[in-house]
Structure formats: structure tokens, C-alpha cells
Image (spheres, rainbow, N blue to C red):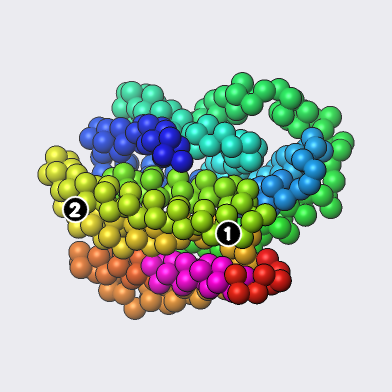
């Protein structure tokens, strides 16, 4: 696991370079817009309605080992699903969203195929490849004064092509040759594909609402505190120094927990070990991240980077630590209640947005504390539910998972 964490830091070091260079060469407004559109693009991965997560779960549960048809049904179904949703968005005149949404959703399909084969580092590499593409495009942006939307669309297109090509080279044509050819569409089974959706839709709903939770406030910052949008974006990038370690565990746990479901004791030990490890990393890296933001604020001449990063790392970071074991709900049950809990948290957050002051830097900080505080409460309850479910199964082994 440590190798995976270190490998992800090596990959996401590219994001750090991007975070340092873009605000240096671009105006605050253009930099903030680029980060906003990138965040929006990743939100649209949820158009798959949990099919990717469902496929991971079914793939790990299937005995004997899944055959090629399992993968073919998932990929061809996802392809048709992406095309349909993208056409609808295009007809509704959301052309940019339709295009970058299709690209990020397709990248999610490739990532899923890599993840179930435990090709974790390559699976995680889409965002770093996207960052390299953005950085490589920077001279063109400066010379031709390209808009943020043009840069983002071009970067997503190139990154998706490169990412898919690397996946094919790494895993081999045995996995990808059949499922990415048009004749494979003849083998499409709606029933088989929607079995993936049905298996993953609850966790997708919870994850999508979590993403929407932060997207709503990012939109609030862009609309009402536009002068702080660049501060927010830079702080979010700096905070990734801490978040990368935490989210690596969240990313890997969905597969690792699934591999240990045959033994309750092994699953319990796996959850305890991952939580202990992520707490240690958070305690070691969090203070370094906050200290770095202090100097970054001075270097770039921004006004609110240190305070924003402090709030993100201390509150959102702890929330992510607790939420890093949420993948256990997939195998212990209880995701329906978790989705309901997130829906309530999201509703409260949106309602509070209507009463939060919309002027002044303290209102901006209050908005962040409100959102991250609610998410911390949600994560704490989620972690408690995991341990409650473990104790319940331990006391009554016949309890169905």
C-alpha cells in the first residue's frame, strides 16, 4: 500500500507543478475559470449512474472468475449510455458539458477496467495526464490568447486518447480488443448492463451528491465571491498535498475490502489498518501543507490562500480521513441509509447557502466552514456506521451482509 501511496504522489506531483505554474502565468480570472471547468468535467462522470462501481462489485463477487462477456456487457452498455446522455446535453445547448462529460465518463470506464485488475497507479493517472496536457498547452494559451473553455476541451480530448492508449499497452489487447470494437455492440445486453447500474447506483448517488456538495459551494464562490475564486482554486490544489494520500486509501479500499469479504476478521483488520495508516499520513503531511500555503500566498500575491488552505486541511482533511473507510458499506450493507444521510446533508447545506452573507471575506470563510463542517459530520456518522455494522456481524455471524 505504501508503494501505491508513494506512486500516487509521484503521479500527482504533476498536479502540484500545474498548481504552481498556472496562477503564475495566467490571470486570476482565467486560472479560476480553468479549474472550475475541470471540476465540472469530473462531475459529469456520474452520468454513468454507478455502472462502474457496480461492475467492480460484481467483478469481485463473481465465482468462478468473470469471463470476457462480463466486461463486454459493461463497456458496450456504458458506451451507449454515454452517447445518449451526451446527445441530450448537446440538444439542450450544453455543448461544452456534453463533450467533456463524454470524455471523462469514457475515461472512467477505462479506469474501472484497470482498477479491477489492480493496475492502481495507471488507473489513477488520468488527472496527471490531463495536467501535463494543460501545461503543454500553456504556450499556445499565452501566444494565441485561447479561452479557458478551448483549453479545457482540448486538454480533455488529448488526455483521454493518451490515457486509453496507455491502458491498452499496459493491460494488453486481450482485455480491450473485443470490447472497444464496433462489432462488440452486437453483443450488447441491456439487462446485463443495468445489473451494473442497479448494483452501483446507491453508492454512485452518495458519491455524486458528495461531489455536488462541493460543486455547489464552488459555484457560490464563483458567483458571489469571484475575487476569491483563484484563492479557492489554488488552495484546493495545495490541499491535495494532504488529500492525495487520503484519497489513495479510499480509491484502493473498494477493491481491497472486496478481496477480504470472505473472512469477517480479515475485513475488520483491513479496515482498521487502512484507517490507522491514513490517520498517520494525515498527521504527518497536514501541517506541512498548511505551512506551504503560507509561503505560496506571499509568492503569488494572493490574499486568502493560507486561511482557505487551513480550513480545507483541518476540517475537510479530517472528514476525508473518516470517509476513507466508506467503501466498507459496499460489502457490509447500509449504503441506502448513507445515501439518505448525504441527501439530508446536501439539503441542509443548500438551505444554509440562502442565509449565509454574500459579502466580505468572513462570509467567504463562513461558507467554507459551513460546507466542510457538514461533511465532517456526515463522515463521522458514516465511520460509526461501519464499526457498528462490524460489531453487529461479530455478535451475530448469521447477519446478512
Measuring 38% from the left and 35% from the top, which residue is drawn there?
6
Point out the frontmost of discs 1 and 2: 1
**Is any atom of residue 297 visible in this view?**
no
Q: Looking at the figure, which quarter contains the C terminus?
A: bottom right
295 is higher (above) or lower (below) than 172: below
User: Most prominent secondary structure in the magenta stretch?
Assistant: helix
Q: Which mark is residue 306?
A: 2
Tell how many labels: 2
Q: Residues within 10 Å of mark 2 (few under 14, many from 20)?
A: many
**Is any atom of residue 196 visible in this view?**
yes
Q: Which residues are magenta?
A: 375-393
Of the two numbered discs 1 and 2 on the same chain, state the one appearing first in sequence. Answer: 1
Q: Quick check: is 389 in the magenta stretch?
A: yes
Q: Judge left or right: residue 285 versus residue 136.
A: left
- Residue 93, position as x, y percentages in the image: 59, 50
- Residue 167, position as x, y percentages in the image: 60, 27
- Residue 103, position as x, y percentages in the image: 58, 38
Identify the residue under disc 1: 265
SS at badge 1: helix
The CA distance from mark 1 to mark 2 is: 43 Å
Measuring 56% from the left and 41% from the top, which residue is drawn there?
104
2 is higher (above) or lower (below) than 284: above
Which picture quadrant has residue 27?
top left
SS at badge 2: helix
- Residue 220, position as x, y percentages in the image: 37, 62
Q: Determine contact: label 1, label 2, CB under 8 Å.
A: no
Residue placed furthest toward the right: 186
Amino acid at each position: 500500500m505504501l508503494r501505491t501511496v508513494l506512486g500516487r504522489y509521484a503521479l500527482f506531483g504533476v498536479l502540484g507543478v500545474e498548481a504552481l505554474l498556472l496562477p503564475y502565468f495566467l490571470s486570476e480570472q482565467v486560472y479560476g475559470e480553468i479549474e472550475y471547468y475541470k471540476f465540472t468535467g469530473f462531475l459529469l462522470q456520474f452520468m454513468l449512474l454507478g455502472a462502474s462501481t457496480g461492475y467492480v462489485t460484481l467483478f469481485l463477487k463473481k465465482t468462478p472468475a468473470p469471463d470476457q462477456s462480463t466486461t463486454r456487457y459493461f463497456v458496450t452498455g456504458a458506451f451507449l449510455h454515454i452517447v445518449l446522455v451526451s446527445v441530450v446535453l448537446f440538444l439542450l445547448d450544453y455543448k461544452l458539458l456534453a463533450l467533456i462529460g463524454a470524455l471523462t465518463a469514457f475515461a472512467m470506464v477505462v479506469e474501472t477496467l484497470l482498477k479491477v485488475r489492480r493496475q492502481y497507479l495507471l488507473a489513477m493517472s488520468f488527472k496527471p495526464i490531463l495536467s501535463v496536457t494543460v501545461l503543454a498547452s500553456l504556450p499556445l494559451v499565452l501566444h494565441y490568447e485561447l479561452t479557458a473553455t478551448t483549453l479545457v476541451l482540448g486538454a480533455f480530448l488529448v488526455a483521454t486518447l493518451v490515457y486509453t492508449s496507455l491502458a491498452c499497452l499496459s493491460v494488453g489487447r486481450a482485455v480491450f480488443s473485443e470490447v472497444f470494437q464496433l462489432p462488440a455492440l452486437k453483443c450488447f445486453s441491456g439487462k446485463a448492463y443495468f445489473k451494473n447500474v442497479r448494483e452501483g447506483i446507491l453508492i454512485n448517488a452518495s458519491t455524486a451528491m458528495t461531489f455536488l456538495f462541493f460543486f455547489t459551494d464552488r459555484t457560490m464562490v464563483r458567483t458571489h465571491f469571484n475575487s476569491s475564486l483563484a484563492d479557492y482554486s489554488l488552495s484546493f490544489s495545495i490541499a491535495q498535498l494532504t488529500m492525495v494520500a487520503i484519497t489513495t486509501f479510499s480509491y484502493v479500499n473498494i477493491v481491497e475490502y472486496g478481496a477480504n469479504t470472505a473472512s469477517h476478521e480479515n475485513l475488520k483488520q483491513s479496515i482498521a489498518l487502512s484507517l490507522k495508516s491514513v490517520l498517520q499520513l494525515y498527521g504527518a503531511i497536514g501541517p506541512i501543507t498548511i505551512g506551504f500555503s503560507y509561503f505560496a500566498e506571499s509568492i503569488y500575491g494572493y490574499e486568502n490562500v493560507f486561511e482557505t488552505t487551513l480550513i480545507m486541511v483541518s476540517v475537510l482533511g479530517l472528514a476525508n480521513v473518516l470517509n476513507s473507510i466508506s467503501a466498507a458499506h459496499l460489502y457490509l450493507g447500509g449504503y441506502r441509509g448513507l445515501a439518505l444521510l448525504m441527501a439530508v446533508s446536501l439539503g441542509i447545506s443548500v438551505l444554509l447557502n440562502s442565509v449565509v452573507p454574500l459579502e466580505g471575506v468572513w462570509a467567504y470563510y463562513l461558507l467554507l466552514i459551513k460546507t466542510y463542517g457538514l461533511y465532517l459530520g456526515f463522515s463521522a456518522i458514516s465511520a460509526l456506521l461501519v464499526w457498528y455494522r462490524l460489531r453487529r456481524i461479530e455478535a451475530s455471524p448469521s447477519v446478512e451482509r
